[in-house]
Image: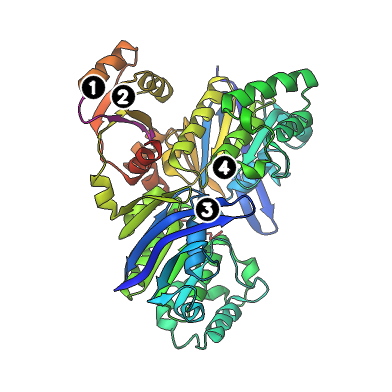
Amino acid sequence: MESVNAESLRKTYGREKLLAVDDVSFSVSKGEIFGLIGPDGAGKTSVFRILTTLLLPDSGTATVDGLDIIKDYERIRKRIGYMPGRFSLYTDLSVEENLDFFATVFGTTVEENYDLIRDIYIQIEPFKKRRAGKLSGGMKQKLALCCALIHKPEVLFLDEPTTGVDPVSRKEFWEMLKRLKMQGITILVSTPYMDEATLCDRIALMQRGHILSIDTPQRIINAFPDHLFAVKTGDMYGLLRALQSNKNITDSYAFGEYAHVVLPPSGISPEDVQAYLQQQGVAGIEWRKADVTIEDCFIKLLKV
Amino acid sequence: MAEYVIKAEKLTKKFGDFIAANAITFEVEKGEVFGFLGANGAGKTTAMRMLCGLSKPTSGKATIAGFDIYRQTEQIKKNIGYMSQKFSLYEDLTVLENIRFFGGIYGLDNQQLKSKTGQLLHELGLEQEAKKLVSEIPLGWKQKLSFSVAVLHSPAIVFLDEPTGGVDPVTRRQFWDMIYDAAHRGVTVFVTTHYMDEAEYCNRISIMVDGKIEALDTPSGLKERFNAPSIDEVFYQLARGAKRVE
C-alpha cells in the first residue's frame, strides 16, 4: 500500500516566483524508509511542509496515508508525526511537560504509547524536570523525536534530523530509525549527508527543486555509467592538478584520502592515466578500482 | 626549523566546576591544514574561542601568530580570519558591500580594497552578482565568498568552523580547493568539520573527547595507530567512550 504519493508538486516563493519545488513526483510504500538527499536549497523542506499540510503547493497533488493534502488536511495532521529541522518544542516547558502536552493535543496519553518511545525516552529521562531550552543539541533531538511519535503516527517526517550532529550521534540516530521501521511506521527523512543514503530503502537525490534520480541506493549505484578508480600519492594537491589537466579524463575529485578518477566506458585506459601521471612528475602512485558510492552518483548527476 | 603559528600549552577553560577544555597542548605549523575534530560538546568551540582571543583561558598558555592570548587579543584578531557556517556575511548587504565592509574593518586602504575586490570577484566568477544582496545568492557561493572575505587581509591563520555544512558535494570540493590554495600561499588553516572524508584532506588532525585532545597525528598515522580503515572508524572508537553529552 502506498503511504505517501506526490504528483507533479510545484512551489514558488515571493513576487519573483523563485522556484523551490519543480515537478516533484514520488511515492513511498508503507513501512519504508524514504530519503530525500540533497544540499541546502534543494527543496527538501518545502516538500515536507507541503506533505505535512503546512504549505500549499502552487500546483500538483499529493496524498498521505490515502488522504488528500488539501481536502483532508485535518485528518492527515492526526496521523503524521513531524520533526522540523529547526527545534520547535516549548523551551520553557520541561521535558516531561512537552511530552505530556503533545500527547494531550493528540488526544492520547504518554502511557498509552510509551512502548514506541521507550528506547529513546530512557536516554533523556534523567533530565525530565529540565526545561527543553536548557537541553543539549543531542537531547533536544531525542525529545523532539519522542514528541513526534507520542500519538503513534502512521507516517513520520524527519527534516534533517542529523544536520550538524557528530558521526557517533548520527549512527545512534539511524539505529533508532531502524527500530521504528520495524514497528511498521513509514519514515520520510531528509539529509545533506550522502553517506546516510544507503541507510534508506529508497532515495530521491534532489538539487534546486528537482529530483535528479529516484530508486534504491543499490540501483542508483549500479546505474553509474563510467569506470571509477581511486588513486593516492603523497601530494594530493599535485595529483588533483595533474588529473584535472588531462581533458580525456571524465572527472576527478578528492575523496577522503584518495582522489577518485572517473573514466569513460571506452576511451582512455587506466594504464594511459598512470603513464600520464608519471609523465607529469607525480610519483609513488597507488591505483585501484573503487566502489561507486552515492556521493559519486550525485557528483555525476550534478555535472551532466 | 618549523615555524609554529599556533602554540598551546595546557590550555584550560572552566565554567564553574565544568572543565570545558582540559589542558590541551598542541602546535600548528605555518601553512598547515589542521583539522580540529570532536563530538558535539567535546569542547571544540570553547577551545576555538580562546585561540581567537574571544575568551580568556582559566589557565595554560598559548600564542597565535606570535601573540599572547591573554594580553594581545587585539593583535590576534587583526592577524586571523574567521568563518563559520552560522555567521559569515551580512545578508542584507550586497556582495560588494560585504567585501568593502570586512576589508575596511581589517584596515585595508581604498587602493588595496579596490584591487582586492576586483581580483576576488573575478576569481569567484561573481562579477555579475556584485550588486546583488547576499541573501539572494546560492548557499555554495555564499560560503566561497565568505571564505574569500575571511582571508582578504592575508591573515596568518584562518579559523573555519564547519564551513561546508549543507553544501552539495561538488561545491564542498571547490571549497576545499580554495582551502588548499590558501595553504599553498602560506595561510595556516584551522578547520572543524563533521564530514570525516574532509578530515582526510587535512595534514594533521586532533580529536577531542570530553575536553581533552585524545589523539593528534596525520590521518594515516591515526588509522595505523587505531588499526582502522578510515578516520570515521578512528573517530568512532574514540568518541564512543565519551562520558559527556554536550
Please name which of the two marks, 1 or 3, marks the residue nearer to the observer.
3
* Residue B228 against residue A44 in the figure, above or below: above
- Looking at the rendered structure, the secondary structure element under dot 3 is strand
Q: Which mark is residue B88?
A: none
* Residue B225 horizontal side relative to residue B61, left or right: left
The span picked out in magenta is: A254-269
Q: Residues within 10 Å of mark 4 (few under 14, many from 20)?
A: few
Callouts 2 and 1 close, C-beta under 8 Å:
yes
Rounded to the nearest angstrom, the CA distance separating label 3 from label 4 is 12 Å
Callouts 3 and 2 close, C-beta under 8 Å:
no
* Residue B196 horizontal side relative to residue A164, left or right: left
Q: Chain of mark 2?
A: A
Give a yes or no on whether discs 4 and 1 share a subunit: no
Residue A261 within the magenta-colored segment of the rendering: yes
**Amino acid type at mark 1:** Ile
* Residue B114 against residue B71 in the figure, above or below: above
Image-quadrant location for residue A36: bottom left
Q: Which mark is residue A268?
A: 1
Q: Which residue position is annotated with label 2?
A: A249
First along the sequence among labels 3 and 2: 3
Q: Residue at x 64, y 53 (%)?
A: A15
Rounded to the nearest angstrom, the CA distance separating label 2 from label 1 is 7 Å
The N terminus of chain A appears in which quarter of the rendering?
Answer: bottom left
Q: Which mark is residue A20?
A: 3
Give a yes or no on whether discs 2 and 1 share a subunit: yes
Q: Which residue position is annotated with label 4?
A: B138
**Amino acid type at mark 3:** Ala
